[in-house]
Image (cartoon, rainbow, N blue to C red):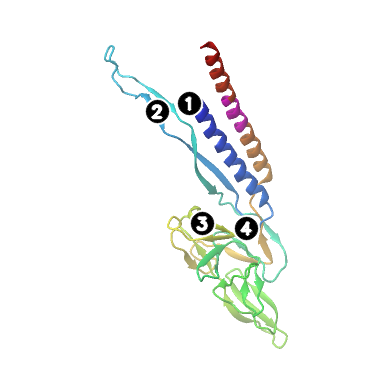
Amino acid sequence: MRSLQIAATGMSAQQMRVEVVSNNLANMSTTGYNARRAQFADLDYQQLAKPGTVTAADGTVLPTGVQLGLGVRPASVATVLAQGSLSQTGGDLDVAIDGKGYLEVTLPDGSSAYTRDGGLKRSATGEIVTADGYPVVPGITIPAAATSLSINAQGDVYAYFSTQVKPQQIGTLTLASFINDQGLQAIGSNLFKETEASGPPTVAAPGQDGLGTLRQGYLEESSVDAVREVSELITAQRGYEMNAKVITASDEMLQTTVQVR
């Protein structure tokens, strides 16, 4: 019976939906995390009678036909591009992106990655790096004698010294944007990589070319809505149960047929 295979695809789809929801809930406290949504598409259709087919009986044209669907398949796991709320931390190297854009970092293999996690740190050599130690592009080194830092909305970084009144500019943070943010490849650790689907990055100073601005002393919280995720979880669970009921019903129908024979 086709219903067994069709219901099995439905159960697999709902299981994947639960896995996506569980990942969202697990990242409720992840800085700069954007929730994901599982999206599905129907499978091919078995054309028992195509619409518009001329019947052999009287030559009339079938207005609808008979098309039997064969189930469902995963289409994509899309990123919900909604900015999380900004949480004040007061840290000199905590910067939230208020609007569009990503910070660029350099990976150990020399390639570039992009992140919205602005919880930056100071390395042993004074370089501004991510929590995992990846240098932020463009490279900025904080002088050892600096007592504090100031980062304005346009990304200019100033160092303060006890021996002078005016601060010294030591660099400018830039932001990168993409034509298709959904096409970025997530590689973990709050990092994304460029793909052919995302297009090449456009790099500019914060506040220019439609990019967001920086907020020093803030971090962007996860955009996961716990209430919505729990609702998605309940819906997925009920969908899984209903597909399981279809398998049970199909099995009982097959059992009845065997007993009749």
The residue under label 3 is which amino acid type?
A: Gln
Residue on which the image places disc 3? 185
Q: Who comes first in sequence, dot 2 or dot 1? A: 1
Q: Who comes first in sequence, dot 4 or dot 1? A: 1
Q: Position of residue 198 (x, y in %)?
A: 46, 57
Observer-side mark, 2 or 1, equals 1
Q: Who comes first in sequence, dot 2 or dot 3? A: 2
Observer-side mark, 4 or 1, equals 1
Asked if the stretch drawn in magenta spans residue 240, the answer is: yes
Q: Position of residue 28 (x, y in %)?
A: 68, 51
Label of residue 46 in the image:
2
Asked if the stretch drawn in magenta spans residue 4, the answer is: no
Residue on which the image places disc 1? 2
Q: Position of residue 97 (x, y in %)?
A: 60, 62
Q: Who comes first in sequence, dot 1 or dot 3? A: 1
Q: CA distance from mark 1 to mark 3?
A: 36 Å
Q: Which residues are magenta?
A: 239-247
Q: Which quadrant holds residue 255?
A: top right
